[in-house]
Amino acid sequence: MFISRFNVSLACLAAPLEHRHSAMTSKPLFRVLQPAAGTDAVAETAIQIWFNDQPLSVPGGRSVAAALLAAGVQRFRATPVSGAPRAPYCMMGACFECLVEIDGMPSRQSCMVTVQDGMRIHSQEGARDLPPLSDQNPSQASREDAHGR
């Protein structure tokens, strides 16, 4: 018997709703891990930041992206061409989907910057130009990402 993709698709549609497989889910894909016993409790200390001029209380000791996701933020930036919403994808600095403006500096990878108390973060709307190097504060240049690179 010949089975085509069309036949399989029809079989999936005929299956009861609870047995269908879906690529999309409404359940969270990630969960916050609890620190191991005897580790530093700084990661669980809530700090205050501002996102799009709204105050947020977020967990400290993690990246800006992780803190914003834990606070329920779902849209970090808009694409330059279509304005489609974007949010962190890889969480390791490879995809550039998590770009935000942090303390006035545009195009920062939020997954690579450790969240700090009092940060002012704005979603990035479209393309941004980086300021000239002469405008950068030397103390900020040394904190380019969470690893000091």
Image (cartoon, grey):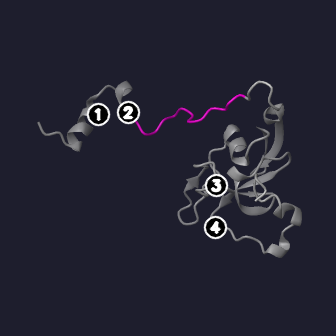
Given the image, on which type of amino acid does mark 2 rest?
His
Side of 118 relative to 2 (left or right):
right
Residue 54 coordinates in the image, percent (x, y): 78, 46
- The kind of residue on which mark 4 rests is Ala
Residue sitting at x 62%, y 45%:
74
- CA separation in Å, label 4 and label 1: 42 Å
Q: Where is residue 17 in the image (x, y as percent from the top left)?
A: 36, 27
Region of the chain picked out in magenta, as a range: 21-34
| Label 2–label 3 contact, CB within 8 A | no
Residue 93 numbered mark, or none? 3
State the SS at label 4.
Answer: loop
- The answer to whether marks 2 and 1 mark residues whose Cβ atoms lie closer than 8 Å is yes
Q: Nearer the viewer, mark 4 or mark 3?
A: 3
Q: Which amino acid does label 1 sit on?
A: Cys
Cβ atoms under marks 4 and 3 closer than 8 Å: no
The circle on residue 127 is 4
The first of marks 4 and 1 along the sequence is 1
